[in-house]
Amino acid sequence: MWAAVLRLIDWFVPEAAKQERSERGLARNFVFTHLAGPLMAQSICLFLYLTDPQPGPVVWTMILAICSFWLLPFVLKFTGNLQLVALLSVQVLAFASLFGSFHYGGVSSPLLPWLVVALLLGFFYLGDRPLLVLGMFAGDVAAFYAAYAVNGRFAERVAIEQLTTVGWISIFSATVYMSWMAIYYVGTISLRSELEQEAERHRLTAERVRQAKEHADQANLSRSIFLAKMSHEFRTPLNAVIGYSELLLETGEDEGADEQKLADLRRINAAGQHLLALVTDVLDLSRIEANAVELSTETFGLAAFIEGVVATARPLTDQKGNELVIRTSGELGEVITDQTKLRQVVLNLLSNAAKFTSAGRITLTVRRDRTPAGDWVEIRVDDTGIGIAEKDLPKLFQDFAQISAKTAGQYGGTGLGLAVSQKLCALMGGAISVTSEAGRGSSFTLRIPAVLALEEVRNEAAAPAEAA
C-alpha cells in the first residue's frame, strides 16, 4: 500500500527534483502534507459551519482557503518550482489563520497559533530567503491589525466559550502536523550527518590515495634514477668488451687465426652489441621517466637528414634481402627539432621493419604537411613483413612488451624500442601511430611539428603532472 501511495506522491514531484535525493525528499514531504493536511483542517470548518448561527461567506471562505491546499501539488507538478508553491502555501495558511481569528475569537482565537505554524513553515521551505518570510509575516500581521482598526473591534460571530472544541481540534491538528515536520527535519539532519561523514571518509581516502601516489611516484623516480646510473656504469665495460672483441677479430683475420676462435669472437661481439643496445634503451627510458632528457634543437634540411638515415639503415634492410624504397612528396625544406632524437626514432622504425620482413619491401615515405596552425613532418615506414594482429596493437608502445613469447624468441628484442620512440616523439611534440594486419605487413607513422617550441612542449608535459 505504501508503494502505491509513494507512486501517487511521485506523480506530483517534478522530474528535476527527482534527480537529487534531498530535493526529492523535500518535494515528497510537501506533496504528502498538502494532500493529507487539509483533511484534518476541514474538521475545523465543519465545526464552525455547525456552530455559526449564520454560516455564510465567512465559513465558505475558510472552506475554500483550506481546499486550495489540495491544488498546490498540481501547481508543483506543472511549474516544477517548489519555492513558489511553498510561498503560496505559507501565504494561504497565514490568511486562513488571520481571517478565521478575526471572525472567531480575535486575539484569543484558537486559530491564531496557526500563524506561527505558517512562519515556521516559511523558514522550513524558504530558509535561504529569511527576509522574504519575515516581510510576509509582518505584512499579514499589519493587514490583520488594519482590519481591526477599521472595524473598531473583532467580529464576534460565535462566543469564545463555544470555540473550545475548535481549540482542541486546532491543537491536535497542529501537534500532528508539526510532529510530522519535526520527524522529517530530524531525518534530514541525520541524512546530512551521514553524508558529511561519508564525504569525510572519501576525503581521507583521497588523501591516502594521493599520498600513496606520491610514494609510488617517488619510488618510480628512484628506480629510474637507479637504472639510469646502473645502465651508464654498464656501458663503459661493455664498450671495452666490444672494442677488444673487434680488435681481436681484426687481428685474428689478419693473422689467419682458427675459424672456431673467430666464430667465438664474433659471438662475443654480437652479444656485447646486443647487450649494449639493451642498456642504451633502458638508459633512455629511465632518463625519460626521470625527466632528465634535455632536447637540443637545431635547424637542418629534412632531405639531407633522410639521406643520412637511409645510408645508415640500408645495411640492416639488405641483410634479409629487402628492397628499401624512398618516397618524398613536395618540398621538404628545413625543420627545427632535436636531430639526434629524431634520427634515433626513424632508425628504430626502419630496423624494426627490417627485422620482421624477409625478401620483401620496406617503404620510407616523407612529406611536409603545411597547415594554417603550422607545418608538420610526417614520416611513414611501411613493410610487407609478418604484421601484427589487431588485438596485439595496444601492446606495442608498452615498456618491455612484445607481441608474443614466440615472436620474442624468434626475432629477439627487448620490447623497449617502440616505447622509447613514442616517448621521444611526445617530447618533440608529436606521436607515433600504427596500422597493421597479421601476415600483410605494418605501417608506422611518425608526426612531429616542423618547428619545435620547447616551452610549449615543457608546459604540455608538466600539465598532467600538476593535475595529478
Image (cartoon, rainbow, N blue to C red):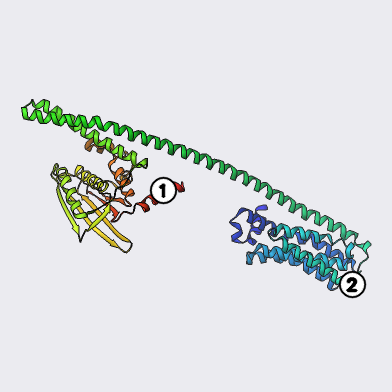
Residue position marked by numbered label 2 in the rendering: 54
Q: Is residue 35 visible?
A: no
User: Which x, y percent locates residue 26?
Assistant: 67, 56
Residue at 46% across / 37% down in the picture?
Answer: 215
Q: In the displayed structure, does residue 137 sit left or right of residue 128?
A: right
Q: CA distance from mark 2 to mark 1?
A: 85 Å
**Disc 2 residue crowd, few under 14, some 14–19, many 20+, Cα 10 Å:** few
Q: Amino acid at mark 2?
A: Gln
Kind of residue at badge 1:
Ala
Q: Nearer the viewer, mark 2 or mark 1?
A: 1
Secondary element at tag 2: loop
Neighbours of disc 1 within 10 Å: few (<14), some (14-19), many (20+): few
Find residue 267 and report its image quarter: top left
Work out whether residue 417 or residue 113 is closer to the camera in this orientation and state it: 417
Q: Please tell me whether mark 1 sits on a helix, a strand or a loop.
A: helix
Determine which residue is flagged by label 1: 462
Figure label count: 2
